[in-house]
């Protein structure tokens, strides 16, 4: 199965940039981005093994924000044991490890199939962290072969394995159902919508990379973005936290005429009740 990368339309690029520009200026969004950019609570840099990073990405699914500390303790324990030890552990042992975050069998199945996939990649000479890796192909393969993965988990797994600034912009379900309409993005039905939206967002940042970097500077974000990389990780966090803070509700100050209204928040349309 293949999914061609979307060639983002000029209007889509403008809307992505416009929304990121507006959201980046919101103090609450900025606070969340700064708290999670250089050291993300869900995917900490203290985990050095890419295999455990991919495990963490899968085990974070269906864990609420209020349980992030519990999840972090489980991942820290998993990392201390090591991936090979986890792969060789009994189901009972693993169930005890993941019990605090629930869904033990689902998480065990994810680990078992992830271990099988990584073994297959090693035999094929595929390095998911290599500079020449085809990330689109790896995401598709991951989603197809790892139980419970789907495209959104595969995106997160490859992002965490390769590092925050690898250029992958993961798309969760809320981004598809809440953020895409705010951007006026027409997405296909089903799980493939996550891949289509990822391609559009990445293409937008690529097309206007310097302008996105300027937003970081102009809004005085206290974050570290390496030289020579596109600010995809920063843009992802701006969008994910805007979605969480303003679209999940939605927030009362949100304009109902988005994406046509460029102001998005606290605009004249909302004041008039249009």
Image: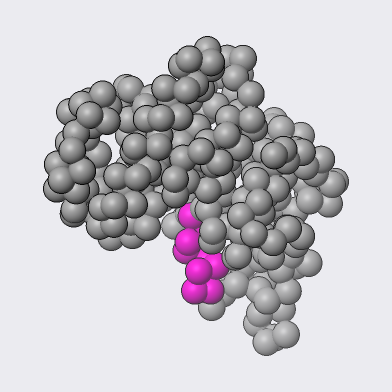
Residue 243 counted in the magenta span: yes
Instruction: State left or right for residue 107 relative to residue 13.
Output: left
Residues in magenta, as a range: 241-251
Q: Quarter of the image holding residue 44?
A: top left
Does residue 54 appear in the picture of this structure?
no
Quadrant containing the N terminus is top right
| Total marks placed | 0
Does residue 41 appear in the picture of this structure?
yes
Q: Residue at x 24, y 43 (%)?
A: 72
Relative image position of residue 35 (x, y in whole percent): 37, 44
Relative image position of residue 27 (x, y in whole percent): 47, 55
Instruction: State left or right for residue 40 relative to residue 140.
Output: left
Residue 120 counted in the magenta span: no
Relative image position of residue 68 (x, y in whole percent): 28, 51
Relative image position of residue 135 (x, y in whole percent): 61, 28
Please name whichever residue, 100 or 144, is drawn nearer the observer in this view of the structure: 144
Q: Quarter of the image holding residue 140?
A: top right
């Amino acid at each position: 199965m293949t999914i061609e990368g979307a060639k983002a339309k000029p209007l889509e690029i403008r809307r992505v940039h416009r929304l990121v520009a507006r959201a980046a200026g919101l103090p609450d969004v900025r606070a969340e981005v700064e708290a999670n950019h250089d050291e993300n609570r869900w995917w900490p840099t203290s985990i050095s093994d890419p295999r455990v990073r991919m495990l963490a990405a899968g085990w974070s699914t269906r864990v609420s924000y209020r349980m992030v500390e519990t999840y972090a303790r489980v991942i820290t324990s998993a990392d201390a044991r090591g991936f090979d030890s986890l792969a060789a552990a009994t189901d009972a042992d693993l169930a005890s490890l993941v019990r605090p975050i629930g869904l033990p069998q689902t998480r065990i199945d994810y680990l078992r199939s992830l271990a099988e996939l990584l073994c297959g990649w090693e035999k094929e000479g595929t390095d998911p962290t290599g500079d020449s890796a085809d990330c689109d192909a790896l995401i598709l393969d991951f989603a197809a072969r790892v139980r419970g993965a789907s495209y959104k988990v595969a995106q997160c797994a490859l992002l965490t394995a390769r590092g925050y600034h690898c250029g992958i912009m993961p798309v969760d379900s809320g981004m598809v159902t809440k953020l895409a309409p705010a951007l006026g993005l027409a997405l296909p039905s089903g799980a493939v919508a996550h891949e289509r939206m990822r391609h559009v967002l990445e293409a937008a940042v690529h097309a206007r990379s310097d302008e996105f970097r300027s937003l970081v500077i102009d809004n005085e974000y206290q974050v570290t973005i390496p030289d020579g990389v596109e600010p995809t990780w920063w843009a992802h966090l701006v969008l994910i936290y805007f979605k969480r803070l303003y679209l999940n509700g939605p927030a009362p100050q949100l304009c109902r005429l988005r994406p046509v209204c460029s102001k998005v928040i606290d605009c004249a349309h909302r004041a008039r009740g249009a």
